[in-house]
Image (cartoon, rainbow, N blue to C red):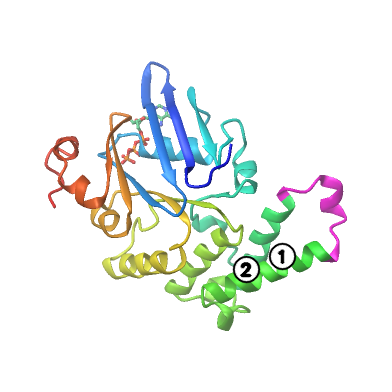
Amino acid sequence: MTDRGGPILRTTGLTKRFGEFTAVDGVDLAVDRGEFRSIIGPNGAGKTTLFNLISGAMTPTEGTITLSGRDITALSPAERVAANLARSFQLTTVFNGLSVRENVRLAAQAERFETLSTARRLFADSGELEGVDRRTDAVLDELGLRSVADARASDLSYGDRRRLEVGLVLATDPDVVLLDEPTAGMSGDETDATIELFEDVLADRTVLLVEHNVDLVMRVSDRITTLNGGREVATGTPAEIAADDRVREAYLGGYTA
Ligand SMILES: Nc1ncnc2c1ncn2[C@@H]1O[C@H](COP(=O)(O)OP(=O)(O)OP(=O)(O)O)[C@@H](O)[C@H]1O
């Protein structure tokens, strides 16, 4: 099966139960290549659980996940990264004591070597290492981090640190980027800067964003899926979602356009 034109990421009947409780209930998602899709919903709607199922942090009780037509349901998180499904931003992935270049290089190297056998990893040849160096330089250029490439991560300005975090994701050259509340705890200005960064460097990627901040989601998304009680309530453009009575009901009037 070819994925051209079809969804790059698809979930079918995706379900997660914790004992008697169903946190994610038969969710069918179809995210197109290049789409910026956000998942919203009130507290407890199942957003984080859905995210964890897609990243591989949790195993579904039922249902399947495909990436470019390949069934990835049984793959580990690391195997999913190797299949070009990038993990979300995690502050902990930045090594403070290392330089910006070393951080990006490690991320690029981890992805490359994940796909190699142990023997080849041990005896990685210079061609493979050159590939890592090329990817590292490309990411530093893409994010405008060349001028601080030799600075320690701990010495970066806030904005450059966010850029580095994005760089660590892009270093794996992902087809699909998963973002879990990337602006949590940020001020309004920091949130705006992060949104601009996304619009800049993630424009041609497929993105799945789980986010509480509905205003942010309305600004950056191509389409939005609303969950409530583990089920999909509605999927549509920001304008469609803002006008959808079922979505308003899910939020009990919490959001008005
Ligand atoms: N490990 C777990 N064991 C039992 N119940 C869980 C577990 N993880 C999540 N749940 C429950 O599943 C439901 C959905 O949780 P989830 O965190 O996915 O929702 P959410 O939409 O991300 O919520 P929030 O917006 O509050 O972060 C909640 O009722 C939660 O208590």
- The residue beneath circle 1 is 132
In the rendered image of this protein, does residue 30 appear above or below residue 238? above
Give the mark nearest the N terminus, 2 or 1: 2
Residue positioned 64% across, 74% down in the render: 137
Estimate the x, y position of residue 148 in percent, counting from the top left.
57, 80
Question: Dot 2: what SS?
Answer: loop
Left or right, residue 152 beside residue 157: right
Kind of residue at disc 1: Val
Q: Along the line of sight, which residue is nearer the eye, 166 or 30?
A: 30
Kind of residue at disc 2: Gly
Q: Would you call the spot at circle 1 few (<14 residues within 10 Å), some (14-19), or many (20 or more)?
A: many
Residue positioned 45% across, 29% down in the render: 12
Q: Which quadrant would the N terminus be assigned to in this image?
A: top right
Q: Read off the magenta span.
A: 114-126
Say whether residue 208 is magenta: no
Left or right, residue 159 beside residue 133: left
Quarter of the image where one finds residue 112? bottom right
Residue positioned 48% across, 74% down in the render: 160
Estimate the x, y position of residue 5 in percent, counting from the top left.
48, 47
Say whether residue 122 is magenta: yes
Left or right, residue 102 beside residue 39: right
In the rendered image of this protein, does residue 138 appear above or below residue 18? below
Estimate the x, y position of residue 62 in percent, counting from the top left.
48, 22
Label 2 – label 1 distance at C-alpha: 21 Å
* Ligand 1's quadrant: top left
Which disc number belongs to residue 97?
A: 2
In the rendered image of this protein, does residue 4 appear above or below residue 228? below
